[in-house]
Image (cartoon, rainbow, N blue to C red):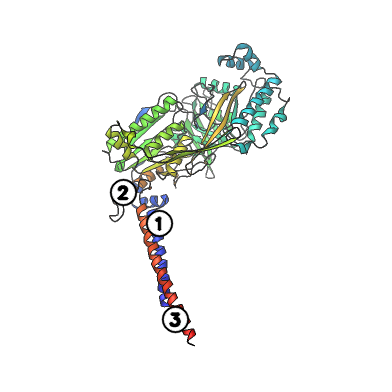
Amino acid sequence: MHTRKNAFLAVVFSLAFSLTAFAQAAPSHAEVAAQAKDTGLQKLDLTGAPKLQFYKSLPGSKPADVAPTNTPSKTDPTAPSTTQSAPGTNAPADTTAPTILTPGTSPDITPDQVEKFLESHGMDAATAQKASNPTPEMLDAEFMNIWGFIAQKYYNGDKLKGWEVWPARYKGKLKTRDDLDKAVTAMFASLGDRWTTFTSIESMLRAMNSAKANLEYLGVGLARNANGTFRVEAMEYASPAWNSNMFRPGDIVKSVQTVDATTGKVTNHDLTGMSKEDASALLMGKKGDKVIVVVNHDGKDESVALAFDETPAEQIEVGMLPNNIGYVRLPSFGTSADEANALGNNFLRALAMLDAQAHGNLKGLVLDLRANHGGAVDLAKKIARIFLDHGTFLKTQEREGGTDKFEEDVFRSPMAYEYVGAPKELVDLFTRLRTVPMTVLVDGSSASSAEILTGTLKDNHRAVVIGTQTFGKAVAFVRIPMGTGMLQVTTMHYLTPNGYDLANKGITPDIVQERTRGDVSTHTDEQLVTAVQVLITASNSLTQPDPTAQTQGEDDLFGGESLLLVGLGLGVILLAVVLTHLHFKYRKERDEQEKADRNK
């Protein structure tokens, strides 16, 4: 009996040894952060934003806001496009039906304005006049054009079940442009897809009129809830609202108090029940004008006093944090090919500058994608290639007629010939960048290509993601000008390497870390502090390796694969020895018992 007890303990010890080795070899990201905090680094002086230099302003206009804000664009919002847009390059529409003011009912947009608008965008005078006052037959034809395009190009055929009922539902019933808008809105609502939208010419004209008024934007993107209230959906970096550090995605914006610049009259506007367009208009104003926004979060109301001001141009920010840890904030992925190329070149120059400042010995890198609303997927791919030796970049889902297409974009390890003619310094830089420990900072305003890059680095175990849940947009769409407005249709979904469709859900960080609201000059950026803590811990583990451990592979998060294999291997061997011993022991006891039975 004593022998059996010892054997059982040996088996338990064997399994425990294997599991202990596994736990030591592959700590969770949360454990890495906890270990970092135990070192006392939580007291690291990173109050406010790090002292960073502005590396280089981006060319052209700043990216469109990812949230459906109905805010004016600095560029022509009506420019037609029949090519696939990169995620994040156009402002999405809200999930709720928009309030549309059409000719005949709108005091500010008339058929004459629509006619002039159409003429200015390439339509001849006679056709423009007809389009501004369409016949029922023209409206029926327009509805069928929209219906047919979605039937052929919409990315998910499963959502088109019952699509055949729509033509008959409105046949002969469309008399005005307003009828068409309502019919298209109802049809699109059946898809449950916020990115497939139709924007009337009247709405585009209204946005253009606001842009001409030289109004500034507070930087809060609103989304309408089912109960008529409005929530913060996304923030614009460096805007007045962002700089206040008092708003977070999900907050309820209850009211906006305005002051008439001429009379000084104070008016309180309760947003509940307003149209999306009217609520968003309250967040626009002339530079210097002041408002008080009442926001509800964590069960309490809070008043935030803000002044309208110009949001500075987006820039790449770069700087060196303590312990030779580099920091780069990428503001967007570009709204055009030229801007994306400029961003990519300047991003690489920023990395080279940090590497040079660290004398080729960067201990870690923080990639800040907070409030990055996305842009060109190609730039996200180029950046991922900088940091990954090999692995899956992303997966896609799209449709062509009756064919569903699922594809995978995979990186292979660079071949030697690819480096022929390249300066040795550049080759060495890329080699170092593929192994330096990384963290990625995200928040609820990180969207589209920012989420694609985050998912790539996360699923390939190349970086630890820190912050809060991302926005939840990884789609591509086409924009088609129609006679009555602009059609936008989702044609592709992007999935992370693990096959996760983040649309309307977002990416959950490895380490969820909130930020304290309030004055950034007196509050620590907890997300940045956590990133530095994780990187210092990772750097220390790399510079103080176990002398008995084998060389670790590049694909491990922060090393440890060899310890895992050794632990499991020894555990299996020990278990086999114990089981073999038990087998022969029990066989001997059985033989002796059988011999005794025969002699009875």
Q: Which mark is residue 542?
A: 2
Toward which corner of the image does residue 422 lie, by quadrant?
Answer: top left
| Residue most extreme to the left | 359
418 and 79: which is toward the camera: 418
Give how far across and how far down residue 156 sits, in percent: 59, 36
Give how far across and how far down residue 537 sits, in percent: 34, 49
Q: How many marks?
A: 3
3 and 316: which is toward the camera: 3
Three-letter residue code for mark 2: Leu
178 and 438: which is toward the camera: 438
Three-letter residue code for mark 3: Glu
Are discs 1 and 3 less than 8 Å apart at CB?
Answer: no
* For residue 374, above or below residue 509: above
Residue drawn at the location 32% of the way across and 47% of the way down: 539
Does residue 365 appear left or right of residue 261 in this picture? left
**Label 3 neighbourhood size at 10 Å, few (<14), some (14-19), many (20+)?**
few
Q: Which mark is residue 592?
A: 3
Sequence-first tag of 1 and 3? 1
Q: Which residue, given by chain and number where applicable, does mark 1 sit on?
A: 23
Mark 1 to mark 3: distance in Å?
Answer: 44 Å
| Residue most extreme to the bottom | 600
Quadrant the N terminus occupies = bottom left
Toward which corner of the image does residue 366 lie, by quadrant?
Answer: top left
Mark 3 or mark 2: which is in front? 3
Sequence-first tag of 1 and 2? 1
Three-letter residue code for mark 1: Ala
